[in-house]
Image (cartoon, rainbow, N blue to C red):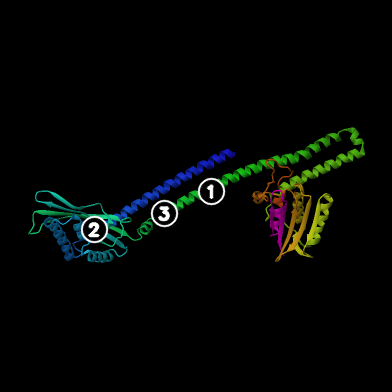
Amino acid sequence: MKQRINLLIAFSVIALIALSVVQCYLVKTTYDYKVAQFHSEIKEEIATISNDYSDIDSTIVNKKDLLYKQLAEHYIRDKRTKFKIKNALLQNQFRGELTRKLQLKFEREIPNITIDFAIVLNKFIIYNSRKKTDTIFSEKPLIKNKLYGNLASLDNAFLVRNYVGTTSGSSQMQDYKLLTEDSMYVSVMDWETIILKRMRMVLFLSLLSILTLIILFVIAIKALIKQKKVNDVKTDFINNITHELKTPLTTLGISTKILERKDIRDNEVQFNTILHTITRQNNRLQNLIDQVMSSSLGENKIELQKEAIDSEIFLNVIIADFKISNPKINLIADFNTSKTTLLLDQFHLTTAIQNVLENAVKYGSTTISIKTELIQNQFNISIKDNGIGISKNKHSLLFDKFYRVEQGNLHNTKGLGLGLYYVNQIIKAHQGSIAVISDLGKGAIFTIMFKV
């Protein structure tokens, strides 16, 4: 059973992980699609706005074209170095004005988002009439080759467009053509937030589905563990009650056979002894049956006959009776209260406290102390013993029905595991509570608390 449950848990974990990975993959795919869609929208809007840059300011654009021609012709005529031509291109006089005007246009046409941009020069090539090529400049897009714009880096930017332009020579120098290529990169501020807002429904549903799977998984695992626990408890209970019932039944059977003998019937002393034995075993059987029957009652079903009692007198009577049946146990009373009146069911509470005392004896106690305290309108009865104690990981199970403390895999004491369950039910029926402090080998302290 345990092996099957472990295998089922293992397969369930693997299935949950697989489903979570698939869900994450779908979310990532949707995210990538939304990013691509967003980039396409930005490209279309900026393409409409820039329109080959000519609608920004024709005067500035003309200045730019004129600068390109002048630099090309200076290179052809004066043989300026390519380095000087490159510096002149990148340190152009129109960069500040073009940047400002394009920024204003973006703000006006796309007011909902903040865009940073850069126009980066990629190529500056001269073709003469003899079809010879002179490459002044040709590099991959780099921010250091920015013609204008306010971007400081291309790391988080994306390409919007490449613009290739050709320019013919001036009237004085017509035997060449100029080819230029530049790229426009943009970066949208908080673009991740924009994408996530567009995906909020997808993310919500994905998160909800994963959480639902996890919750269902946890519920299923808890149900399996609980079922296993119930099955173990049932098996343990059947074994225990079989053992407990077998002894008095065997004794009754033997006693009945003995009574069939004529010599026993003729001997009054032996006859009475056998009758007493039968009576005791019959009472034991009845007690066992009553204990099982009473365990089916919850605290709300227990009918209490409450009466006002003096707590100290009530406890002294329990202590006196317990000392008679357990003369070898050192029972100490330590009452820090005096004439405290409580409204309690004397019969049920007597049984509950006796169960705690008997449990202490069952599990090796030789000294037990009963202490009373009154703390802020709360009457506490503490029962401390020097028995074998209870490991801390078992504390939460102590008051479960049929649970009995184990030593390894063996129960070293007799009983059905109903005592502390019954105690807890009785205390709850009185609107009180019970707590335990214990560790293995260090005894235990059971504290019963009632409101005064």
Residue 57 magenta-highlighted: no
Q: Amino acid at mark 3?
A: Leu
Q: Quadrant of the C terminus?
A: bottom right
Query: Is there any visible trace of residue 302 in the rendered image?
Result: no
Q: Residue at x 91, y 39 (%)?
A: 269
Q: Earlier in the sequence, mark 3 or mark 2?
A: 2
User: Could you say where residue 274 lies in the image, as x and y percent from the top left?
Assistant: 86, 39
Q: Are marks 3 and 1 in contact (CB under 8 Å)?
A: no
Left or right: residue 131 versus residue 285 is left
Label 1 is placed on what type of residue? Val
Horizontal relation, residue 56 to residue 400: left or right: left
What segment carries the magenta color? 423-452
The N terminus - image quarter:
top right
Residue 181 appears in view: yes
Q: Please tell me the numbered disc located at residue 218.
A: 1
Q: Measure how far apart labels 3 and 1 are at the Cα level.
A: 22 Å
